[in-house]
Structures are given as C-alpha cells and as structure tokens.
Amino acid sequence: MQGLTEETHRVIADLARQYGLSEDAVLAMLMAVQRGQGTMAQFNIGELGGSGQWMLGGMTMVGDMFNYGLKNTVDSLCNALSQALAAGRIVFPTETGGASVWWPQHLGSPSSAGAQNDSAYAVFPAQRRLAIKDAGGVTLYDTGDHFISGVGQQQGSNSGLTFSSQYGSFSVSSLRRADEPAEPVQPQEAWAPPLSDVQPSAAPKVQPLQQQPAAIVAPAPSGEAAGQAPPAPAPSGSTAPKGAAEIIGLIEKLASLREAGILTDAEFSAKKTELLARL
C-alpha cells in the first residue's frame, strides 16, 4: 500500500517475521482491523485459513475451525495490530493523498481521514475524537461511543457531513464539540408511584376480644321427647329423705295420719318399716 510511513512498514515486517507470515498477509489483516476501528475484523486471507472473524476480547473464527494453533495466531496478530493502531505506530495515508497533517498533534494518527468537497475529516477512535477542517479552521468533536465506519456529505458546509456507525447515520451537528463542557449527569432518582396510587399501609386491625356468651344449657329432654319412657311418679306423700331428722319427721306425720284414721295400723307399720330401712 502506497503512502505508509517507515514506522508502519517496520511494524508490518516485524509482525510478519514473528508469526511466519508474508507482509502482504499482515497488511491485509491490518486493513481489516483498521476497518473494524481496531476492535473487530472480517477477513479472507489464504495464509490465515481463508474467511474468518476476530473480535477484541471475544471469539476468533477461522475457516479451519478445529485448527486451534491458527486461531491463536490470528488472535495474537489482530491484538498486536490493534495496539499498534491505538498507539499511533501505524499511519494510513489520507484519501486526498496529501502528506500534511492538519489535525492537532496530540491526537496521534487517525484511523481514517479524507476530504469531502471543502471539508476534511480525521477519525481518532482511541481518543473518541472527530476532527473537521473547513474554512473556519479545525474543530474537534466528541464521538462518544460511536464506532465510525463511513462518511458522506449533504449539500452545504461541514454541518452537512454525515457519518455512519453501529447506530446508523448521524450528522456532525449532533455531536458535542470537544471544547464545550459536558452536560452534568443528573442522578437518577428512584421511581416512585404517584401519591394518589399509593395505598397507606395500615396496621392490621386488631379485633377486640369479645366475651363469649355463657353456654345456654338446654333443659334435658323429657322422657317422651327422648324416646324414653317417663319416670314413674313418686308415691303420694313420699319424698327422698335427706337425713335422719327428716325421716323421723315423716314417721311422726304418718303417726298423726293413723290417729286420724286415715291410715290403718298395717299401713303405718309398713311405711314406718320402709322409712327406717333408709337410715
């Protein structure tokens, strides 16, 4: 490739010797890594197994999928090229063919540079900067997390420059100028539902202890209701004595009934014998 610096040729030659490859194979891989902004590459190189893919810190795929030695070679080579690009050891010629460097020197070498109509651009992914040169001078923009992979221009001045990244097409005017202070990041407050939607968490209601009503004891069913024969009525004039005094009182009553002629001597004697047996 024409226009490469001596340092770039030296890097390519050293890597070719280190990995046992031709300089053309290393240069082809360099172009693939450069197109991937130093973080990825899609390539088709015969010396490296044909078609393959590489991603920084990710998976490496080669045509000979079970050739793990080849995978390690591709991964190591791509990592070395990515580091050389980030360090500015590799410089690509601008699309205009000009050798002059118009961007600030502290940015190092751009991953890509070119010109569209009256504007020139240079992309510096490691520094997250895009340099634009027009009639008003050189302006630096913060590219944020864009990985610029293409450029175009609408009608007009540099504000019409458009670039493409993993997010699609965007204009230079949508980027923040590097000399402008970044907007402070407002702390994100934890979301809370509107007060109208919040139901107060009331304490659980404690039911007062209610005094249980005293158990109502239903009267025992009569013998007829219970299906049992009713108890035989007690003999007239006789109750179950509760003590000796009561029995003696009953005998005295019986004696008075005999004297009145209500009871016979036989009836008196039988009842008296019955009462005395209860003592």
Image (tube, rainbow, N blue to C red):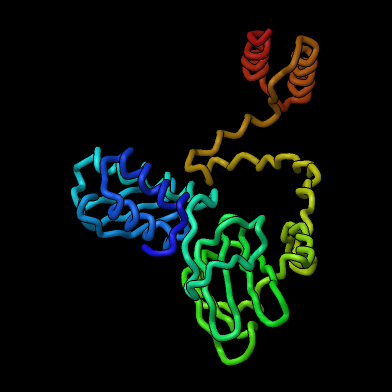
Answer above or below: position of 138 versus 158: above
Answer above or below: position of 138 versus 276: below
Residue 94 percent across, percent down from the top left: 50, 69
68 displayed left or right of 57: left
Residue 209 percent across, percent down from the top left: 79, 42
| The C terminus - image quarter | top right
Residue 114 percent across, percent down from the top left: 52, 73
- Residue located 54% across and 61% down the image: 110
- Residue located 57% across and 61% down the image: 124
Of all residues shown, which one is farthest toward the bottom? Answer: 155
Visible residue check, residue 163: yes
Residue 68 image-quadrant placement: top left
- Residue located 30% across and 59% down the image: 43
Counting the numbered discs, the total is 0
Residue 208 image-quadrant placement: top right
Residue 228 percent across, percent down from the top left: 48, 39
Answer above or below: position of 198 versus 18: below
> For this rendering, which residue is in front, 32 or 169?
32
- Residue located 20% across and 42% down the image: 67
194 displayed left or right of 119: right
> For this rendering, which residue is in front, 27 or 186?
27
Visible residue check, residue 72: no
170 displayed left or right of 54: right
| The N terminus - image quarter | bottom left
